Image: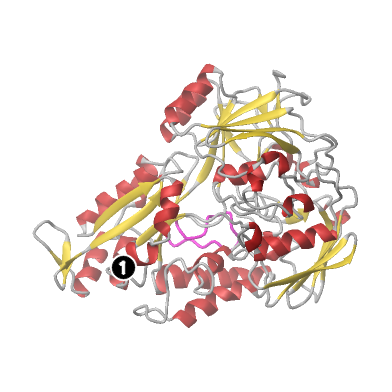
Amino acid sequence: MSDLRSSIESATSARKKWRWPVIAFAVLLVAAIGFAATRGGGADAGAGDGEPVRGGTLQFALIDYQRSPDPQWGTNYAESLIGNNITDKLTWQDPETGEITPWLAQSWEYNQDLTEFTFHLRRDVTFSDGSPFNAEVVKANFDQYVHGDPNLGILPNGATLLPGYLETRVVDEHTAVVRFAKPLASFLQASSFTANAQPGFLSLSTLKLSANQRTDPKKVIGTGPFVYESWEPQATTVLAKRSGYNWAPPALHHQGEAYLDRIVFNTIPEASVRTGSLASGTLDATLDVGTTDEKPLADRGFQIIHRGVSGTSIRFDFNSSLFPTNDIAVRKAIQLGWDRQTVQRTILTDSYSVADSILEPSVHGHVDYSGSALRYDPEQARRILDAAGWVAGPDGIRVKDGKKLEVKLLGINNLVVNKPAYESIQQDLRKIGVDLQLTVVPIPDYTAQQAKAETDWNITAANRSRNDPAVLNWQYSPQSGNGAYVTKDSTGVDVNDVTQVLGELETTLDPALRARYAKEAQDILLDKYALVNPVYNPAQVIAQAPYVHGIVFDAQSRNHFVNTWKSNGK
């Protein structure tokens, strides 16, 4: 893994500045060719051979559907992926290095306390309705993104990403200062964030619309390389090339408009139908490729491109306030009681990897726990449960104080590997006397059940996309996501300890200190309190026809299509 010594982390002076010439030689050519590992396709699937061809329509399949065209609201992969192609961000994060590089902001600086971030904006950017992108737009977007607007039915979608947001000050037309009440080291990464509920910029005319009015895609106006052409709920979203676009991230080395004329995003929940449509030529590319389909498609000449999803692993978040996962013995036994190599060998392909930490390996500060807290040691798991008074019952499931060791898990089926991996763990845990009960459902059902997670579910299983170690504070701090439901009443868990250790990640951009704080955060989550059980590192896997080139995976493994082209020109 790279040491990620980037502009956002080299805080060696009171004020840090970035000017574009400084990074001219730092940008790698790989940025232009898709940031993706490939196999089965011969030539690099991102770059392709020869000069890009302009024109044509890309037929692209997804397992999910877009519930609203509003990119600041969307919380599934389809919504964030589509939103990234109609909006732009202040900055771009290099997916290989983690480095934050220019985009709509040409340069920036921040104060020593990490509470003020000053952005100097490009002067040539416009929205697709012709209105200018400027500091007033930045202010209006961040204000609504964080605070919402109850009168319009707009939720405070950015409140968790930007905690402590105070205001955006307009210094002049092209200079904006974003201010926070407390240090927020992760804000520069947040300014490039492309995953759920993202800060993609919308025009002032769109910001005036209600949530219901924003279901008209023609009224959702961004600065991105594509614009909405049509939206059919739960079926298709069609994007058309934005005329006059010429401000792709410099790291992509792309000049001018997108190559494609149009992209059709097709919602196809059934893996067999996605695969069959690709094989028949109805589709040009599909996301969410089944693990059993990767090799057959590669053998037929389709290119398989993939990237691990930076952030947390797919993990079991233990409810530390609900029986029986309020018992640290149960949490530690579950961590030790299943064979990760079995999951790697029988469930995963080379596109994925079994988790050795809560942080995915590409995230700065990742530490390997496969030889300690996350080793496979069923005998030790049994001893821990024995010592805690859990006694094997007649059916093999342990019992304590007349209650069975039944652990209820809520998971999402949006990633093809999820359910098979959980079932493998379920089989192993039964051997040590733990009855893991699985409920793995589509995202809407998961979201509905998650509202009752604190009282009804021992485990919620998911991942969190964010290429920054502060994802741990975001997800697990009792003052933020509190994914393990840590409270002052949690047995054997010091809420102040958890809050303080995780909060340190927001206090510095020094890479060595951040790595130290990241390790301390992982120690407290995985070892000291055993609040989480990492399972595997997710990936986004695309199968594409050999004439498709230049699909980009960004630092959150969302796809951008400004560089995409088809050599058949259709």
Q: Is residue 160 magenta?
A: no
Asked where in the image residue 244 lies, by quadrant, the reply is top right
Q: Secondary structure at mark 1?
A: loop
Please give left or right for residue 467 compared with residue 445 in the image.
right
Overall secondary structure of the magenta section: loop
Range of the magenta residues? 356-373
Residue type, numbered disc 1 = Thr
Please give left or right for residue 280 compared with residue 383 in the image.
right
The residue sitting at 77% across, 50% down in the picture is: 205
Residue 408's spot in the image, x, y percent? 30, 58
Residue 559's spot in the image, x, y percent? 64, 41
Q: Is residue 492 visible?
A: yes
Q: Is residue 268 above or below residue 397?
A: above
Residue at the disc numbered 1: 325
Please give left or right for residue 20 compared with residue 237 in the image.
right
Q: How many marks?
A: 1
